[in-house]
Amino acid sequence: MNETTKRIVVAIPWIAFALVIIALGGPVFAAALVFFGVIGLREFFVMATDYRPLQIPAYIGLAGMIAAASFGTSFNVLLMMAVPFLLIFIGAVRRSDREGITTSMAMTIFGLFWIGIPLVHAVLLRELPHHGGALLIDVLVGTFAADTGAYAVGRMFGTHKLSPKLSPNKTIEGLVGGFLIGIIGVWCAGLYQDWLSGTDALILGAAVASMAPIGDLFESMIKRDLGTKDTGSLFGPHGGLLDRLDAVFFTVVIGYYVSIALVY
């Protein structure tokens, strides 16, 4: 079994799980995002342990942001994005050893918003009336297709390095191949959605496929700076949660706004 096939096989049960929680929506979807968000934050805080992040306030803030997106209004979401600053400040004040506390707060806020803002947008996208769940699936299909396509094309045809300092294995050929395959993935998903025109599916696919590699490189930059190869071991040899969702953190945000522009 080659590496591309292994990546697909590992992804299948997680794709099935994602489809179930998206279909259920509501509290189940929100609870699942809180659970995985905490895992992702924990992975980041382990990588950044030298900076002594304030973990408990971040976990509370993350849960509040997702709950506000799921059950509240836009005002509630904005409010709950501000509350973590207060929680982190209180945590900083309560810490007996405040050496490097500014860096600790900064790393905590960075981790919370890197992971929390995309999860909030995932909830907002899922809760869009009538087609939210389907649009979220379209975004995930495009992300998975772009990521897997970039890996496969890069392995087969890649010769020109994309960013050797950040991610030595990524190639320009893989970038182009992933972009095209990501667009095709969303377009194919749109064939089963009579409310999404072919042109709109191509536009959404292009937006998703263009952001997927940026999310991947963003995480690679963080890992390289923090001296980490994988963020965890949740997916065995394929790394941790952040390794699998790095692209999704960027595509779900752009996917939400493009979906609103095209469909609503």
Image (cartoon, rainbow, N blue to C red):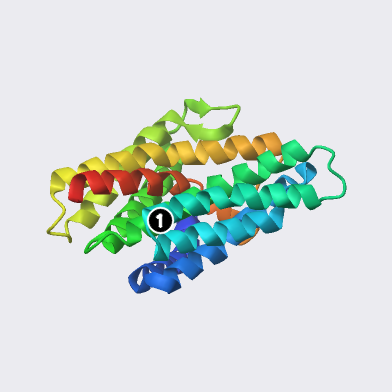
User: Which residue occupies 40% across, 56% down?
Assistant: 122
Question: Which quarter of the picture shows residue 12?
Answer: bottom left
Mark 1: which amino acid?
Answer: Ala
The one nearer the camera, 67 or 155, is: 67
The mark tally for this picture is 1
248 versus 34 height, above or below = above
Residue 177 visible from this viewpoint = yes
Q: Look at 74% across and 52% down and name the residue there.
A: 91
Residue 4 appears in the picture as rendered: no
Q: Position of residue 191 (x, y in %)?
A: 16, 56
Would you place residue 246 above or below residue 66 in this image?
above
Q: In this figure, which residue is indicated by the disc labeled 1?
A: 122
Q: Residue at x 55, y 35 (%)?
A: 169
Give the residue drawn at x 75%, y 47%: 92
Provide residue 138's location: percent of width, then percent of height. 29, 55
Estimate the x, y position of residue 236 in percent, counting from the top left: 62, 60
Horizontal and vertical percent for residue 80?
51, 54
Q: Secondary structure at mark 1?
A: helix
